[in-house]
Amino acid sequence: MESHFYNKISNNPIIAAVSDLNKLEAAINSPCEMIFLLGGNIFNLKQIVDRVHEAEMEIYVHLDLVEGFSREGIVLKYIKENINPNGIITTKSNLIKSAKELDLFVIQRLFLLDSLSLDTGIKSIKHTRPDAIEILPGVMPKITKIISKSTNIPIITGGLIKDKEDVIASLKAGAMGISTTKEEIWYM
């Protein structure tokens, strides 16, 4: 599962982040090979995941942003067995641990506001050992380098990515991929 993620992101480091379900088809029709789902609910999640898989794309579901699910580990077993995404995204350490126990690919999302959140985030990553990290905002190349060297875990940057220069700066800083809701960047 991990190698499949890394192969896909190596082919195309741009990840279509979909927070507005009206843009799902645009993401599916884009050249991106992965979608980060930043919305949905308990009723439409299976349909969304199936639609993305039909298009032979990967989908990673941000559990913290899907409505109707508890934030307890048991939801992961249900999602793995009944919805079958390629993996999950979460900020919650307890869900990361549970996901890894179920052999789900897990991306830990990290919001960086200041030095304290950076230090706390690195400690959390070293403890939880997710398969990948998503750093927000993604327009901080120096911080991307620090996290990359401190954790040795693949990094995705996202949030506030506005143009090609931001993408290039993130990749040069050590990011493996860039997640963005900006459709024009999906076509870079």
Image: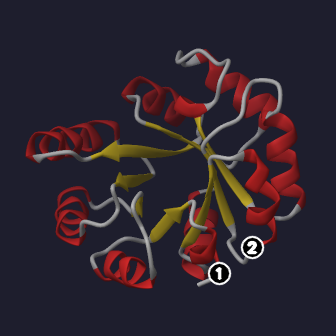
Name the image quarter holding the N terminus: bottom right
Contact between marks 2 and 1 (CB within 8 A): the answer is yes
* The image quarter in which residue 153 lies: bottom left
Hey, what amino acid is under mark 1?
Tyr
Point 60% across, 43% down: residue: 38
> Residue 67, position in %: x, y?
65, 24
The quadrant of the image that shows the C terminus is bottom right
Q: Which secondary structure lies at badge 2?
A: loop
Q: Point out residue 187 in the picture as x, y percentages from the top left corner.
A: 65, 81
**Is residue 78 depicted above or below 55 in this figure?**
above
Mark 2 neighbour class, 10 Å CA radius: few under 14, some 14 to 19, many 20 or more:
some
Quarter of the rendering containing residue 175: bottom left
Q: In the rendered view, tell whether residue 129 sits above or below residue 155.
A: above
Label 1 environment density (alpha carbons within 10 Å; few <14, some 14–19, many ≥20): few
Residue 187 got which mark? 1
User: Would you say 42 lies left or right of 144 here?
Assistant: right
User: Where is residue 111, by image quadrant?
Assistant: top left
- In the foreground, 171 or 67: 67
Mark sitting on residue 30: 2
Instruction: Tell me the amino acid under the disc marked 2.
Output: Ser
Quick check: 153 left or right of 185?
Answer: left
Sequence-earlier tag: 2 or 1: 2
**How far, Cα to Cα, is label 2 from label 1?**
7 Å
Image spot of residue 94 (x, y percent)? 41, 23
| Residue drawn at point x = 58 percent, y = 65 percent | 15
Name the residue nearer the viewer: 139 or 62: 139
Which residue is found at the position 39% from the left and 53% from the top? 133
